[in-house]
Amino acid sequence: MSAPASSDLRHRTAFPDGVSQLAGRYDGFLLDQWGVLHDGAAAHEGAIACLEAMRAAGKRVVILSNSGRDGSENEAILARMGFSRDLYDSVVSAGDDARDALLRRDEPAYRDLGTRCLPLTRPGEQHLADGLGLTLVDAPEQADFLFVLSIDAEKQSVAGWRPVLERALSQGLPMICGNPDRHRVHPGGRLLEAPGAIALAYERMGGVVHYHGKPEPRIYRTCLQRLGLPPSRLLAIGDSLEHDVAGAARAGVDCLFIAGGIHRDELSWSEGDQAFQRSCEALFARNAASPTYCLPTFAWGTGSHTASSAAGR
């Protein structure tokens, strides 16, 4: 079935001049990390200033990330890029959401899961599965389930994990995915594989995968509880149609789509703002997506962050 035309979408996306035009409508903000605040190595231009202005206006901010790392590790990464701890209230990560589900074991998929876990992570990051009462094993034949949390895309790959996935599938092992992102943007602009790509490959092979993070509803319920605000007073900000925009829609939260992130290469940047807007609307139509707002970058004011200037980011 083909994607609906723009006129068939829930509403027409607005293109404000900056976050400042939206801030008065909302009390709380759910902010994606990668592609919105930073590129994995450095803060995006204007991002720190935008957060400072939001906090000066008394806004509540939760960093809502599909990272497999826990909140404290994400805080340390943000600090190294210049995001001081007073710029946000807390970090809620997909990895923490998965770990919470494994600790509670009050959902059907987890009650009889077993405790022998084969973690799929970057080298040296098996600690991401610590503190859960699990026995970490080295082979699918010893495991009750797989737990995918991170990947070093420069050294590891979905293809490289396939033999392990095939052995896990033959054992009928379920997978817990603590980072559903399928790609991330390298600081140089390349798209690299992310842990969600491993989960997708396993699912396509016939494996059972339990996902955590955006766009799943569980992580949004956690954010709503932490902020104590109704969905109507929250704005989600992210760069992924599949995760940020779809997740906000499921949670009944308005969404600001940041175009200069993972979908950057699918858009027109050098022919002026009108061409940029048309390319965004075409992208939304192709993906049956309907963000409430769209900006080239996460920026507070007007002027320097038009589509043409963002093209050189």
Image (cartoon, grey):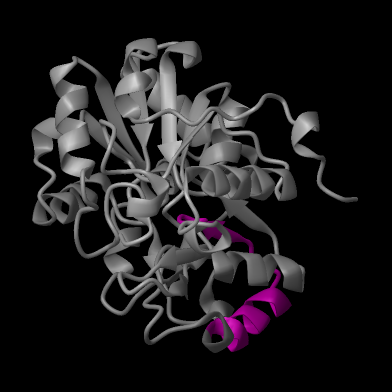
Quarter assignment of residue 24: top left
> Residue at point 55% right, 57% down?
267
> Residue at point 40% right, 41% down?
100
Task: Decide whether residue 164 is among the magenta residues.
Answer: yes
Q: Closest to the observer: 46 or 209?
A: 46
168 on left or right of 190: right
125 on left or right of 179: left
Task: Decide whether residue 113 is among the magenta residues.
Answer: no
Do we see residue 132 in this rendering?
Answer: no
The picture places residue 140, in percent across and down from the top left corner, at 56, 78
Q: Residue furthest front?
A: 271
Q: Closest to the observer: 290 or 113?
A: 290
265 on left or right of 71: right
The picture places residue 4, in percent across and down from the top left corner, at 82, 40
- Specify start and end residues of the magenta stretch as a single range: 161-180
Q: Closest to the observer: 252 or 304?
A: 304
Q: How many marks?
A: 0
> Residue at point 69% right, 75% down?
169
The picture places residue 114, in percent across and down from the top left corner, at 54, 57
